[in-house]
Image (cartoon, rainbow, N blue to C red):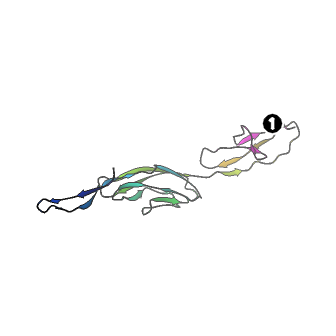
Amino acid sequence: GSPTLSVTFTPTDTANYTTATASISITIDQAPTITSANSASLIVGSLGSFMVTATGTPSPSLSESGVLPDGVNFSALTGILSGSPTIGTAGIYPISFTATNGIALDATQAFTLTVNQPPTITTQPLSQTVTAGQTATFTVAATGTSPLRYQWQANGADIQDATSPIYTTAVTT
């Protein structure tokens, strides 16, 4: 229900038959609850953000505990986890958020921040010249957060079933 209850009070003076009306509000305190998701992902070298949200009356304040990757910060004032993770910070970061408002128990949420490494081609495939009737085999090497997915293309269109780091063409004509 609503954390505020409005009440109207009307006393009547039976001797003089007069009435007076007064309205009051009763605010109902509610313990904090964290309502945002319990995980988020960021990408190394890319700016990203996630907003931690909480409810309660009075409005709860937020805090964070745990190790954040370099380049990422949490603002307790805004509830925003943001930044651009630096090179070498890919991984999983278990952290906790706490919402407190002085009512009952604090709300604590276990949170997982995943920092992904974007894919980088470390070995480019090499162009080849083949004689008609032969195949050509191309190989690429890449690093990044697993699992990496591959898709070979010809003339801008995906080649069906060519989804590994090695691609061998059909016999050329």
Where is residue 104? Give x, y as percent. 29, 53
Q: Is residue 64 above or below residue 143?
A: below
Please say whether residue 53 is one of the residues in the magenta stretch.
Answer: no
Where is residue 5? Give x, y as percent. 29, 55
Where is residue 61? Give x, y as percent. 37, 60
Where is residue 165? Give x, y as percent. 70, 43
Asked whether residue 141 is in view, the answer is: yes
- Magenta segment, prevailing SS (helix, strand or loop): loop
Q: Quadrant of the C terminus?
A: top right
Taking depth in this image into account, of 126 and 173 the one nearest to the observer is: 173
Side (left or right) of 97 relative to 115: left
Amino acid type assigned to the residue bearing label 1 in the image: Ala
Q: Which residues are magenta?
A: 147-173
Side (left or right) of 43 relative to 93: right
Side (left or right) of 149 relative to 25: right
- Corner quadrant of residue 103: bottom left
**Which residue lies at the image location 55% right of the left edge and 55% below the top edge?**
89
Side (left or right) of 109 relative to 18: right
